[in-house]
Image (tube, coloured by chain):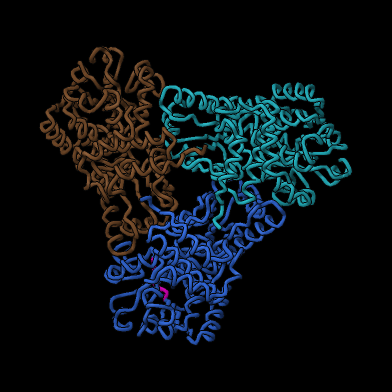
Chain colours: A blue, B cyan, C brown
């Protein structure tokens, strides 16, 4: 375990001035230094908390959350991150608001932000919508701040959109870094991001896309595996290719799960909907064609059912490096015989990796807090030192 | 921009002892000094926050909110105000409570108030109900405090009732004061509070009533304009008349929107339901006559549609003082061609006033915070000075 | 009123090391010293708050609430307790979560607990379910903490289960202690825990069970009265019998309300569903037999209606000790002629006891806070002293 001094030292070597007063939409918009800053601050905040030192940098202020899809762990991660820094969460529940009757994004964004220091949004269901919505909110509050409407500009944190799930993938990678003993040890490691069968419908593409868009930057050999027809967004594949070229790793696709798992150091088997189907659904939804959506759902479930052999079984796990690849999942997983008859993963595999999986999830609150911290403070290294010097106890003693 | 010293000096000239340990139901129950105290404390709190000085006067304590109608901006304003002062918001969601089965107001009021310092209520849908309900809650917690049930008496803040919308109108007027450079400059200014067409049904009367009940106290010439049949509560018209007589301004009614807008310095065009119809609906609701309510709704929408020419158009705006009256709205507005086909205001008018409109809204959190502050502290001027001297930073630095 | 010094002195005489890092499931799992510690800390926290001394022992941290049944007073009591200690409440709303699709209790418990210091659960509807669920959550977070997933282990507080309602009954008894001037004065007092008629269906058994399981420890003569067929869980009756034997009190059952009320010092008349019916409902629910449940509901309401004479009337109250027994209720009560035609209690009786009833409820936030406090701090007496010495004001002055 490193000390706070190590983290501060590391931060001081990084160029991160562009993070100040900025948002976090997509990992591939950030430099390597900026990603490292997120992990370093996440570790530093955790180090302070574990030593019972308060990291409340806000005496008052709101963190606004907007979830356009059900959420447990991201919701609690966002709440935890806000609380850790001293912000109170106020949820924008669109069902209880007046937004329904035609209010513009620009207006809503300003109305909820008079005392907001951060806005976290999850909007992952419709292709071409979620990320665009977040950028519109961000633009609106930036203008509101410029025009003297808002005293401060709330930072926007993407809590999952149609393109990326940056808080998830950044947490995933921080977990991997800890498991492998540092970023430098990831070079040349093989990671399999694989589709897996699930009896449910329409899971977002943001996790596989986020994973290939991020992990390819670490010099790893990243393999994206899925049945034909389960393609992800071509733009993100391009990003993955370019990343791999730059980082000295590789990126390739396969329609063979066994090929991806063979000798893999890390596996991430997970269901998602085909990109083309998600596009189709977005169009049907735009037309309000509910019958069309139901029909599509049936087709997709039937299509899924053709690929029940895409599962993370004990047999497949044996083919990974030393039979003991690190198994990743964003949770909840569809566990065969537990949460469904046939699913993404064998119960015995899941059980063996339960503790590391939960640890993987534990990084998310800190990653979100780090994103806020880096956007709000111009000299994060100095501020961490000041927090240590202040020495306020998290729990009174 | 004034300094904190100016605000404190101003406060010291005002007689406001009656605000301590008191509620805020209707603006016309408050003296001129008391209204000025609210604006002065609102400005002072904003001044402190803008200078990164914490205004947390509560180390712990709850702010209870009860919304009996959908709300975004009032909900967030109340949350922001509570957070600014150090109170944590706890929402009373009647759907998740046991209140349904016949619990008395007196009991509920006490049960939620053991650690509550403020209760904010929005109850604006039924004539004769909302304000009465709030007074019953206030009476109950006053008794609870007297009888040793509650250690403190929570202040009641009216977040919109059937009669008035004091937090809205006080924010509106604070905005006007800032725009015109001080209260003294309002004398003789013409304000048009006008009905405007909206394709929606049953909007509360509390805003037009609140506006004529408050703005007539500033020596302004206030004109209330609406089609025949869209009368507001006669009691509030009486108040407006008396206010105007006392303040040296005037109050009159017209059924002609152009008449109201002619040479106006300030215009507030907004839809509302006819008082008589709201009374009828309240009675139908009391009888549980859902068919009657649906029929009434149809009639009212048809009645509205007869007055589509009541809109804040560019043409009308040109007839105001120098063609540039200050346009006010409590938001969200029904914008023609944006949020509806035909509505309250032309899109180009709304767009031109977007920034001042958002600024108008930005005063509400501070107005609510000021109402709480003035009810909780006997010497608010001294306390503001102590906050400055304490100098706790809102954002750590 | 005692002073803080008295409470600290009292605490120092109690053996309570087993409370540290432990949960609160059932009162009968706790020693007499441990129960006294809860009451003493509750009184001490109230004493500090009444003297405007902050009891925030957490600078940040979450209190998680999970209500599987509607709740007002327990919800607000839990919020108040968390706020009093410095924890922010985050509600786990299962409707807005992803839990529906087969996630295990173990996983959810860990996912919500990364920064949680306490979890409060209400799960009282199905026999054999609620308490078991809570223990599973507790086990999961204990393991999570052991395995390095959670930095801290959140304490579990039972906010009502199928067996006991410890925060309610501990608050009830603290009220009784205050009313009678100390625990020592309870010896030999007669308490009637009696069924009473209500026109509603399926009220939980946890209150009568909790009352007989707790009050029998005070050397009181506890009488459980109900019509035939309204038996409570036999295991809890056994506990009551054993408690009475040890404490020098008594426990007996009767099917005659008048017998129970005769010369009683304390009466607690309240409706509940028969244990056998609750068991049947649990089985029907397990089978998803909704028609069966509706049929059972009808039968139970008919069965209830046979016992409308079981009411706490003025006549019955006259037969109690000096005609002035202390009347207890967990609220809301079914008041004849107020919240229903015929109910548990005469309106005039309820009205006469309104203030003490509200006071009874006022102890619950403090009892919950005390349970958290005693679980989180190894030397609670020393910490109370430190809070007094720190002297932070709850309300700035």
Q: Which residues are magenta?
A: A194-198
Q: Could you tell me which quadrant the N terminus of chain A lies in?
A: bottom left
Q: Position of residue A218 (x, y in %)?
A: 47, 80
Residue A119, visible in the rendered structure? yes
Label count reads 0
Q: Is residue C392 left or right of residue C357?
A: right
Q: Position of residue A6 (x, y in %)?
A: 44, 72
Query: Quarter of the image holding residue B185?
Result: top right
Q: Is residue A84 above or below residue B48?
A: below
Q: Is residue A236 above or below residue B155?
A: below
Query: Quarter of the image holding residue C16?
Result: top left
User: Which residue is found at the position 82% from the left and 27% from the top?
Assistant: B249
User: Which residue is found at the position 21% from the left and 30% from the top?
Assistant: C215
Q: Position of residue B134 (x, y in %)?
A: 55, 28
Question: Which of the pair C212/C128 is nearer the observer?
Answer: C212
User: Which residue is found at the position 26% from the left and 23% from the top?
Assistant: C180
Q: Main structural element of the magenta stretch: helix, strand or loop?
A: loop
Q: Is residue A76 above or below residue C355?
A: below
Residue B332 within the magenta-colored segment of the rendering: no
């Amino acid at each position: 375990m490193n000390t706070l001094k190590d983290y501060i030292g590391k931060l001081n070597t990084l160029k991160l001035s562009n993070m100040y007063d900025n948002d976090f939409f997509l990992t591939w918009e950030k430099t390597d230094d900026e990603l490292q800053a997120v992990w370093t601050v996440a570790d530093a905040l955790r180090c302070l908390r574990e030593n019972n030192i308060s990291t409340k940098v806000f005496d008052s202020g709101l963190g606004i959350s907007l979830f356009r899809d059900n959420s447990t762990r991201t919701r609690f991660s966002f709440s935890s991150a806000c609380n850790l820094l001293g912000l109170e969460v106020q949820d924008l529940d669109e069902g209880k608001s007046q937004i329904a009757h035609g209010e513009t994004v620009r207006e809503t964004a300003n109305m909820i932000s008079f005392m907001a220091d951060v806005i976290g949004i999850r909007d992952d269901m419709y292709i071409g919508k979620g990320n665009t919505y977040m950028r519109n909110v961000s633009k609106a509050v930036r203008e509101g701040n410029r025009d003297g409407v808002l005293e401060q500009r709330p930072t926007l944190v993407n809590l999952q959109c149609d393109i990326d799930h940056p808080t998830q993938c950044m947490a995933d990678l921080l977990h991997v870094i800890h498991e492998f003993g540092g970023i430098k040890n990831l070079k040349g490691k093989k990671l399999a991001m694989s589709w897996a069968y699930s009896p449910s419908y329409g899971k977002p593409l943001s996790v596989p896309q986020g994973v290939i868009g991020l992990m390819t930057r670490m010099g790893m050999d990243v393999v994206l595996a899925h049945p034909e027809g389960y393609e992800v967004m071509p733009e993100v594949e391009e990003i993955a290719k370019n990343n791999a070229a730059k980082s000295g790793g590789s990126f390739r696709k396969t329609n063979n799960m066994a090929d991806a798992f063979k000798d893999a150091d890390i596996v991430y088997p997970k269901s998602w909907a085909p990109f083309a189907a998600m596009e189709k659904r977005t169009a049907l939804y735009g037309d309000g064609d509910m019958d069309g959506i139901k029909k599509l759902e049936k087709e997709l479930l039937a299509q899924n059912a053709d690929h029940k052999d895409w599962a993370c079984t004990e047999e497949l796990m044996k083919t990974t490096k030393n039979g003991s690849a690190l198994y990743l999942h964003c949770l909840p997983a569809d566990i065969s015989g537990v949460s469904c008859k046939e699913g993404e993963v064998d119960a015995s595999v899941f059980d063996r990796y339960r503790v590391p999986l939960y640890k993987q999830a534990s990084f998310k609150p800190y990653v979100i807090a780090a994103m806020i911290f880096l956007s709000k403070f111009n000299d994060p290294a100095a501020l961490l030192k000041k927090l240590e010097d202040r020495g306020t106890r998290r729990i009174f003693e």
